[in-house]
Amino acid sequence: MSAENVGKHMPARVGLHDLALMAEADEHHRYELSAEGVLTVSPLPPPSHAMLVSRLFAWLTANGHTADQVVAHCGIDVAGAGRVPDLTVWATGHPPRASRSPYADVEGLLLVVEVVADDSVTTDWVVKHHEYATAGIPRYWLVERDRETTVHQHRLHRDRYAVDVAGGQPLTRLLTSNLTF
């Protein structure tokens, strides 16, 4: 389909309801929207990415979080931005709930995990870092797909994230530790 044909059907300003409809109609792409209204459409991640998410999901559930608390690819409403983190961890008794849009409100959201892809480095490290901190999400982890699969853990301090472990830690070390929030 040409860009001209797609453009004919696009609203003048894309909102979270539009974003949800696009994502529902297209299972081959991930749709996100910045607070400024910038639409990002990216292909689904490769199997290696999905395997990292699965390993983290299994580790989080093995460390005291239920399957209802650890949710993969849950769309969240971050002050009007529509984000779809790789993993989210929710407080007991506070599962993701739709907000003013089909996306979940961040109330009860304890942790957001993003596996950094080559095409999302700036978005994950700068844009989402700022959006998640501004939204008051207590923890933000970035997982690099480098040789050691480095996990960078950030903890909210006032309105900004502070680094838990300087330089990050290899995923293998994280997966052999006990999780405490």
Image: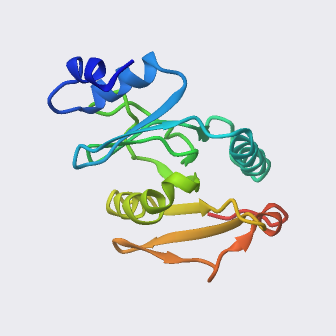
Depth check, front residue: 105 or 163: 163
Quarter that holds the N terminus:
top left
Report the label total.
0
Q: Is residue 49 left or right of residue 19?
A: right
In the depicted structure, whether residue 163 falls above or below residue 79:
below
Q: Position of residue 152 (x, y in %)?
A: 61, 69
Q: Quadrant of the C terminus?
A: bottom right
Residue at image coords 77%, 45%: 58
Query: Which residue corresponds to the image point at 64% horizontal and 80% vertical from the top-left?
Result: 167
8 relative position to 152: left or right: left
The front one of 174 and 24 is 24
Residue at 68% across, 65% down: 180
Q: Residue 25 appears at what percent x and percent y? A: 44, 16
For the point 58% across and 45% down, the residue is 86
Q: In the drawing, does residue 17 fall left or right of residue 119?
A: left
Identify the image's colour scheme: rainbow, by chain, secondary structure or one colour. Answer: rainbow
Return the residue found at the far bottom: 166
178 vs 74: above or below: below
Taking the image as shown, residue 11 lies to the left or right of residue 164, namely left
Q: Give the answer, above or below, for where 10 lies relative to 46.
A: above
Provide residue 88's location: percent of width, then percent of height.
56, 46
User: 170 or 9, which lies in front?
Assistant: 9
Q: Position of residue 36 (x, y in %)?
A: 22, 49
